[in-house]
Image (spheres, rainbow, N blue to C red):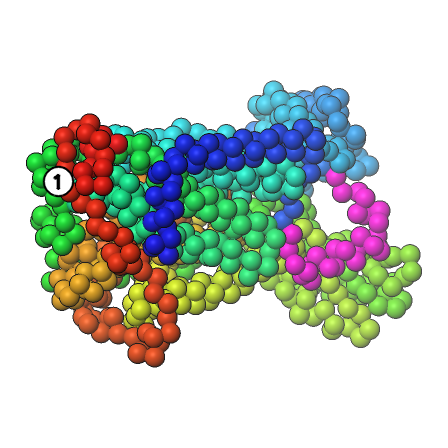
Amino acid sequence: MSTFLSYVGRFSARFRWVVIVAWLVIFAALIAVFAAGSSSGSSAKAETSIPETGASLALERMNDEFPAAADADGATLQLVFHPESGDVTDPGITTEITRVVSEAADLPGVQSTSNPLDPAHPYVSEDLTLAVATLSYGELTEDEQKEFYDAALNVQENAPPALGVELGGNLAPLGAPAPGPGEGIGVIIAFIVLALTFGSLLAAGANLLIAVLGVGVGLMGILAYGSLVPIDDNSIILASMLGLAVGIDYSLFILSRFKNELRSGRTVNDAVARATGTAGTAVVFAGLTVIVALVALLVANLSFVTEMGIAAAFAVLVSVLLALTLLPALMRFLGYRVLSKKQRMALERGELWTEGQKQKRGIMRGWGSFVVNRPIVSLFAGVLILVVAALPMLSMKTAFNVPGGADPSSTERAAYNLVLDEFGGVQSPLIVLAEGEGIAAETATIEGDLATLDGAQQVMPAEVSMDGDVARIIVVPEAGPIDDATKDLVHEIRDDADAASGVHLEVTGETAIGIDQDEQLMQALIKYVIVIVVISILLMILLFRSLLIPVVATIGFLLSVGASFGASVAVFQWGWLDPLIAAPQGDPMMSLLPLLLVGVLFGLAMDYQVFLVSRIQEMHRKGMSPKQAIREGFARSGPVLVAAATIMIVVFAGFATSDFAVGASIAFGLMAGVAADAFIVRLVLMPAVLSVLGKSAWWIPKWLDRILPDVDVEGHSLDVKTPDSTATPASPGAPETRSQPALIG
């Protein structure tokens, strides 16, 4: 592969204008597809489908047997009145409530309005401190939902403060908010880290340019597809943040190798080919690993999860392709200007950098020596930190949807909680379907049995189907839909589903479906972790030709995932960083979050493992002792790994400042996971374990060594198949020849 990629790099450098034009044509074509699809005016939305569960099947059955109930579903809003003093029956308060309800009845889109003080149909709490008016809209488009919600919100905001009016219901703002300044600040900090790493603003700019173009092309491809087939907003968020992060990292690895090749005296074209063949091979391996991890999300058997994984995988693929083609073209344009002034002057004096020369003592060499000399202490301290960080995970709670909206401080959540406190789970009732011949005669008994269950507040009279074999019973739980008591109630009904002879019970409704979705995602997480562990071990056996290193690396990955989960719980469930994180906190974690964190962090962890340990492996293969190889490999790859991880962290930190809870929680989890994996697992635990294991770390059965293909990350094949084009450097501006490199590319 190294030889092939070196040819790709050399071709891209030689025909750089062709490569640039080709990518511009691809970008323009994707824009054209997106524009054409958008002009069709399709307003279809992506669906979050779950494979057939008990609740979803029962819902289909209910819709068949009770079509009127299915047709009754539509958008509604509730004006919840909670006066600051007095009760809702006081004459003055009654007058104001009636006036506000009358004003709401004239809002655009409102089909009907219920007056909570109507004696025929009152909706007032027992203590007379709460009244609820319902605004019914019917089926609405997305644009109508936003327009009508804003109009109702205006009524709520202009109501007399003494009424304590809150606005709730299932008609709420949709979609993700516009990007905030945090994302831009993250990119700026990433540029500063790149400039410090390279010592060249041009090199930093080229690196960031490739990453931004990768995000642009990747997102345009996803949006072009989304203009034809609806996709979820979360797919775009994940693809953008991951595409930007890996795009910066992959270009960083290749550019760093390009600089070293120039400093060793190679011509620009040869340095481009060599960097693409060596670092490019590691980028391909790391990128394919991320792609495999993301595509493997299909094992969850959840369409919207698979969609997110494939979208993010496409963004990563674009980043890899740009790093292997467009970046070599830019490197040819930049030439020796990617080097710092000091490095260019040294090259002019004929001071060549060689791969085998001993590195100057620096922070990374000192840190590597400390870990190698004290491996047991380092290992214990690193594991202790990760375990402590993971402890909050023990209290992790998840929910597929949070009732009352994503923001605990919103008027929507306030309205939901007020109704929940006074009327129980009336906003999220359970629907029990009872099936059996002559079910009408059994409904009274069934209703009585349901009413005796713990957690059941009220049981509505049954509605019997036309054929008399199915009954529909509404059960109002005492608690909310994500409360443990409600989950226990659902499971208890299912456990006794066939207790009565000839009668079978099923539980459905929004609450039961949400419970099933949450449980299914947790089951999918277990399957996915098993798949990821197997993939991790197999890929690293292939790459490092070792049995122990893959096991150690995989255990380290699991520790970093645990730390990511723990940090996410502490912040988004416990609210530890409420002053710093703008997104809503205090709710259970999104059910989807653990699954996504495992997939993305696995790919990123493999990146760091490849770039660090492959360098140590290279030093070991050159005859160094295990500890010497760790020190040298650490000193050479450590600075680049630190820069790459720092860039990842600041990019994800920028996204974590978003007001959008889903995007912020994903970004923060990735930020914490990257910090744990790069700075503790790879820079502490891995060298410590390698130091303890010594030569046994690289042991592999001879029969397995013979049958494994050679990935050749170090580019040994290039030493054999291409000449070593080095020479005494020329003065700036001299023309490039095979024997004399030019300092201006």
| Magenta: main secondary structure | helix
Viewer-proximal residue among 391 and 720: 720
Q: Residue at x 44, y 34 (%)?
A: 18
Residue 680 pos. (x, y %)? 26, 55
Does 308 sit left or right of 142 as displayed? left
* Number of on-image labels: 1
Q: Which corner quadrant holds the N terminus?
A: bottom left
Amino acid under label 1? Thr
In the image, residue 154 lies at what x, y percent? 62, 22
Q: Which residue is tagged 1?
A: 728
Residues in magenta, as a range: 49-74
Measured as percent of width and height from the top left, residue 640 is found at 24, 46
Please tell me which residue is depicted at 74% across the width and 73% down the height of the picture: 499
Q: What element carries label 1?
A: loop
Q: Does the magenta stretch include residue 664?
A: no
* Residue 494 in sight from this viewpoint: yes
- Rendered position, 673 above or below 628: above
Instruction: Pick whichever, 163 or 576, lies toward us.
Output: 576
Give the quarter of the image for residue 418. Answer: top right
Outermost residue to the right: 467
Q: Nearer the viewer, residue 166 or 712?
A: 712
Q: Answer few, some or many: residues within 10 Å of disc 1's Cα (few below 14, many 20 plus, some between 14 and 19).
A: some
The residue at 24%/51% (across/down) is 723
Residue 565 can be seen in this image = no
